[in-house]
Image (cartoon, rainbow, N blue to C red):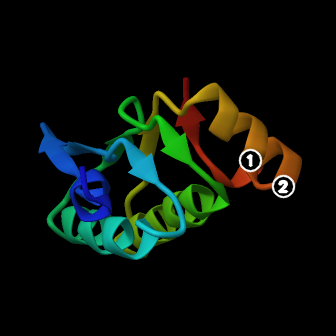
């Protein structure tokens, strides 16, 4: 499966899902897709599909949250993989992510 396909996000009832991969190679595409969903009114992101990620995923999640905040809304991050939550903690950005596992 190509990176572009994995970077796509799907919308479900005000919440969109990440793709299975969110790494440096797919971050730009994922960022743009998520920003479109947020501009259209999405209020949450489900990270359950994430199987492969790196620190770029954190940057994308934070950018999505900032975009939602700019619209006057919060972005609910759910099902953050434990490994990504651990990475966020290691980088000291876990406090920036409003997530539920």
Q: Is residue 21 above or below residue 81?
A: below
Q: Does any portion of residue 62 appear in the rendered image? A: yes
Identify the image quadrant of residue 42.
bottom left
Tell whether 41 sits left or right of 98.
Answer: left
> Which is nearer the eye, 70 or 91?
91
Q: Is residue 101 above or below residue 54?
A: above
**Identity of the residue drawn at 54% across and 68% down:** 24
Identify the image quadrant of residue 40.
bottom left
Q: Position of residue 7 (x, y in %)?
A: 31, 58
Q: How many marks?
A: 2
- Circle 2: element type: helix
Q: Does any portion of residue 75 appear in the rendered image? A: no
**CB atoms of marks 1 and 2 within 8 Å:** yes
Q: Which residue is mark 1?
A: 88
Q: Position of residue 6 (x, y in %)?
A: 29, 52
The circle drawn on residue 22 is none
Calculate the distance from the C-alpha at mark 1 to the C-alpha at mark 2.
5 Å
> Which is nearer the eye, 5 or 85?
5
**Identity of the residue drawn at 41% across and 72% down:** 67
Q: Which residue is mark 2?
A: 91
Q: Residues within 10 Å of mark 1 (few under 14, many from 20)?
A: some
Identify the image quadrant of residue 28.
bottom left
């Amino acid at each position: 499966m190509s990176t572009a396909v994995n970077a796509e996000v799907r919308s479900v009832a005000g919440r969109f899902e990440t793709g299975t991969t969110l790494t440096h190679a797919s971050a730009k595409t994922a960022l743009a897709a998520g920003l479109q969903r947020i501009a259209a009114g999405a209020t949450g992101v489900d990270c359950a599909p994430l199987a492969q990620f790196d620190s770029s995923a954190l940057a994308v999640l934070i950018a999505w949250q900032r975009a939602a905040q700019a619209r006057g809304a919060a972005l609910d991050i759910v099902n953050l993989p434990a490994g990504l939550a651990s990475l966020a903690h290691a980088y000291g950005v876990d406090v920036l992510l409003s997530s539920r596992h």
